Amino acid sequence: MANSALDLPHGYIELFTSLKIRVRDSQVRAQRVVNTQLIELYWHIGREILEQQAQAGWGSGVIRHLAADLRAEFPEMKGFSASNLQYMRAFADAWPGPDPISQQAAGKLPWGHILVLIDKLDDAETRAWYTTAAIENGWSRAVMLNQIMNRTHERVGSEATNFARQLPAGDSELAQQIAKDP
C-alpha cells in the first residue's frame, strides 16, 4: 500500500482489503478458465489425431509435419512440438468418450499433471483415482508424482494430505501449479 500523508477515510482499509481478495480470487478463476480451455484444445487435437490415425493411417511423419505447421501458424504459442502432439494423442486415448474433457475430472488439471498421469499410469481406474485425489487435495505435480510412486491409491482409507483442511481453496498447490503451467 502506498505511503502518503493523506488521512484515509473511515472504512478505507476494509475496502482495500476486500478489493485485494476480490482481485486475487478473480485472477485464480481466470487462470482456471484459461487452463480448462487449453486442456480442451489439447484433448481435441489428440482426438483428431487418433481419428486420423485410425481412418487414414497417419504415422509419426505426419505428426511431425503437423507440429511444424502448427508452430509456424502460431509462433507465439508453446506446446506444438511433435512429442507434445503425441502426448495430446495419448491424452485423448486415456480419457476417451464423446463428452468434452472439461466435463471430466482431468479437464480441471494442469497439462503437467496430465503428462505425469499418462507417463506413470496405464490403468484407467488408477488414473481416475489420482486425478480426483489431485483435484480434491490440491496436489502439485511433484506431490502427485510422489503419491503415485508411493502407491497411495492402494491405501484408499488413509488421507493423502491435509491440504483440504488446512488451506483455503485459492491457496492450494493446484492453483499455484496452474499459474506456473504454460
Image (cartoon, helix red, strand yellow):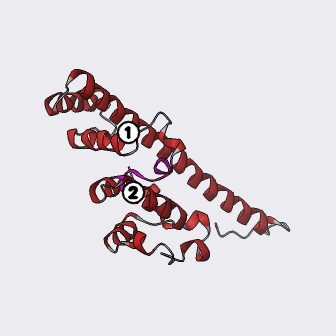
Q: Is residue 79 visible?
A: no
For the point 39% across and 66% down, the residue is 144
Residue that sits furthest to the left in the current view: 61
Q: Dot 2, how many residues are within 10 Å of its Cα: few (below 14), some (14-19), or many (20+)?
A: many
Residue nearest the viewer, comparing 148 with 175: 148
Between residues 105 and 62, which one lies in front from this camera angle? 105
Residue at image x 47%, y 63%? 134
Q: What amino acid is at disc 1?
A: Tyr
Residue drawn at (40%, 33%) of the image: 44
Q: Is residue 81 above or below residue 124?
A: above
Quick one: SS at disc 1?
Answer: helix
Q: Could you say which disc has been placed on residue 127 in the image?
A: 2
Under tag 2, what secondary structure?
A: helix
Q: Main secondary structure of the magenta part?
A: helix
> Percent position (x, y) of residue 25?
63, 57
Asked whether residue 104 is in view, the answer is yes
Displayed quadrant of residue 142: bottom left
Q: CA distance from mark 1 to mark 2?
A: 18 Å
Residue 71 sits in quarter: top left
Q: Position of residue 117 (x, y in %)?
A: 34, 56
Residue 42's disc is 1
At label 2, the amino acid type is: Arg
Q: How many marks?
A: 2
Q: Can you name the residue that lies furthest to the top here?
A: 56
Q: Which residues are magenta?
A: 106-114
Q: Position of residue 136 (x, y in %)?
A: 54, 63
Asked whether residue 113 is drawn in magenta, I would say yes
Q: Residues within 10 Å of mark 1 (few under 14, many from 20)?
A: many
Residue 162 is left or right of residue 48, and the answer is: right
- Do tag 1 and tag 2 residues touch (Cβ < 8 Å)? no
Q: Choose the circle earlier in sequence order: 1 or 2.
A: 1
Instruction: Find out whether residue 77 is within the magenta segment.
Output: no
